[in-house]
Image (tube, rainbow, N blue to C red):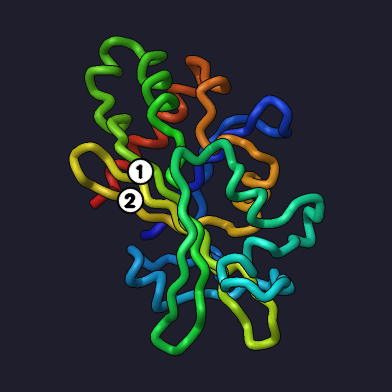
Amino acid sequence: EYFHYLILIKTSNSTGSLGFYASKPSIHTFTGRGERNMKKALLVLPVALALTGCGSEIDSVKDGIMDFNKTITLGQALDNWKSCNDSNWETFETDNGVTVVQFTCSHKILGFVEKAKGLLSKKEQAQASYFNIASNVQTFQFTLNQDDSFQIDNVQVETTWEDGTKFNDSQKPVEQLETAYNNNFNFDPAQLNKASAAQMAYSFHIIKSRAK
């Protein structure tokens, strides 16, 4: 049975607490595996935005204004997101001619997992290979419409371990965009303590067991 895993890391100026949630994917999530599948099967969410300007397709998306936050552009939010160690914009066309603008963020996670592992007991640390994470890459995809608007269709995250195994998962697009707009870390070491580290160990242990 496929489960949708989402790790939420809340900063001190946000509500809620660091936690791990598991639920079955809703009809609005994308459950394909890898870039090839993402390019072939995009779901459309009702978050259409008007295209502005006459520049490139990427610039048109970056200049977009979100309904839930009109203080900055989409590009300002994503390009200045402190959670990203590296980021990239690109565009491609699907087999049926849909133009997709894609933003990729490689999250800062190594310091997080190192601290989490260090908060475990010596015995637990010796067994914590699930914390040997090489990267955590999140991908946002926006599709361009014929009426000069666009929408966010899909958000995927891929976690890769040092042994080469990977786990791909779909996430709720608007929630993930709000994290970027709030300029919050996806993995914040400052929020870790012994209790939350133990919770993260359990979470990553489950995720690693499903990695391929």
Residue 30, horizontal then vertical, whole percent:
47, 67
In this picture, residue 138 sits left or right of residue 44: left
- Whether residue 25 is visible to the viewer of this picture, yes or no, is no
Residue 156, horizontal then vertical, whole percent:
46, 58
Amino acid found under the numbered disc labelled 2? Phe
In the foreground, 190 or 129: 190
Q: Circle 2: is it few (<14), some (14-19), or many (20+) Cα within 10 Å?
A: some
Q: Residue at x 39, y 86 (%)?
A: 95
Residue 28, horizontal then vertical, whole percent:
57, 68
Q: Secondary structure at mark 2?
A: strand
In the foreground, 202 or 7: 7
Q: Nearer the viewer, mark 1 or mark 2?
A: 2
In this picture, residue 188 sits left or right of residue 109: right
Q: Residue at x 30, y 44 (%)?
A: 160
Q: Residue at x 72, y 56 (%)?
A: 73
Vertical placement of residue 14 versus 177, above or below? above
| Number of on-image labels | 2
Vertical placement of residue 117 versus 5, above or below? above
Q: Earlier in the sequence, mark 1 or mark 2?
A: 2
Amino acid found under the numbered disc labelled 1? Ile
User: What residue is disc 2 on?
Assistant: 167
Residue 9, horizontal then vertical, whole percent:
57, 34
Residue 207: image tag: 1
Report, in whole angstroms, how far the alpha carbon at label 1 lies from the one at label 2: 7 Å
Q: Quadrant of the N terminus?
A: bottom left
Q: Are marks 1 and 2 in contact (CB under 8 Å)?
A: yes
